[in-house]
Image (tube, rainbow, N blue to C red):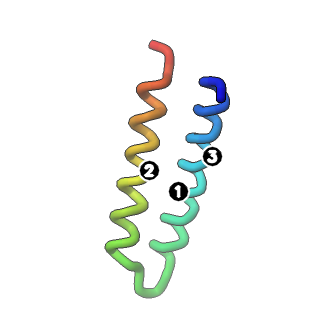
């Protein structure tokens, strides 16, 4: 897998997590544990994207 492929894959995962997070927060009784886990996963992906970005 090339670096570009990896970055695109991570961006897609980040977008999917963002959508899941939005869905969870819009529920009548959002699950705080699920929200926290989704946010942690998004942050891990964001951190990895920053490490992979050329400086």
The residue positioned 45% from the left and 43% from the top of the image is: 45
Q: Left or right of 5: which side holds 44?
A: left
Q: Residue 11, percent across and down?
A: 59, 41
| Position of 34 relative to 16 (above/below) | below
Judged by depth in the image, the label closer to the viewer, 3 or 1, is: 3
| Position of 35 relative to 7 (above/below) | below
If the image is split into quadrants, where does the C terminus sit? top left
Disc on the earlier residue, 3 or 1: 3
Describe the element under mark 2 as helix, strand or loop: helix
Describe the element under mark 3 as helix, strand or loop: helix
| Position of 24 relative to 40 (above/below) | below
Q: CA distance from mark 1 to mark 2?
A: 7 Å
If the image is split into quadrants, where does the N terminus sit? top right
Q: CA distance from mark 3 to mark 2?
A: 11 Å
Q: Which dot marks residue 31?
A: none
Tell me if label 1 and label 2 are in contact, CB under 8 Å.
yes
| Position of 20 relative to 53 (above/below) | below
Residue at numbered disc 1? 18
Q: Residue furthest top?
A: 55
Res 4 → quadrant: top right
């Amino acid at each position: 897998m090339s670096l570009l492929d990896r970055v695109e894959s991570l961006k897609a995962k980040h977008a999917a997590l963002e959508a899941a997070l939005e869905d969870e927060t819009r529920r009548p009784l959002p699950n705080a544990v699920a929200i926290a886990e989704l946010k942690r996963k998004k942050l891990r992906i964001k951190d990895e994207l920053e490490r992979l970005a050329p400086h």
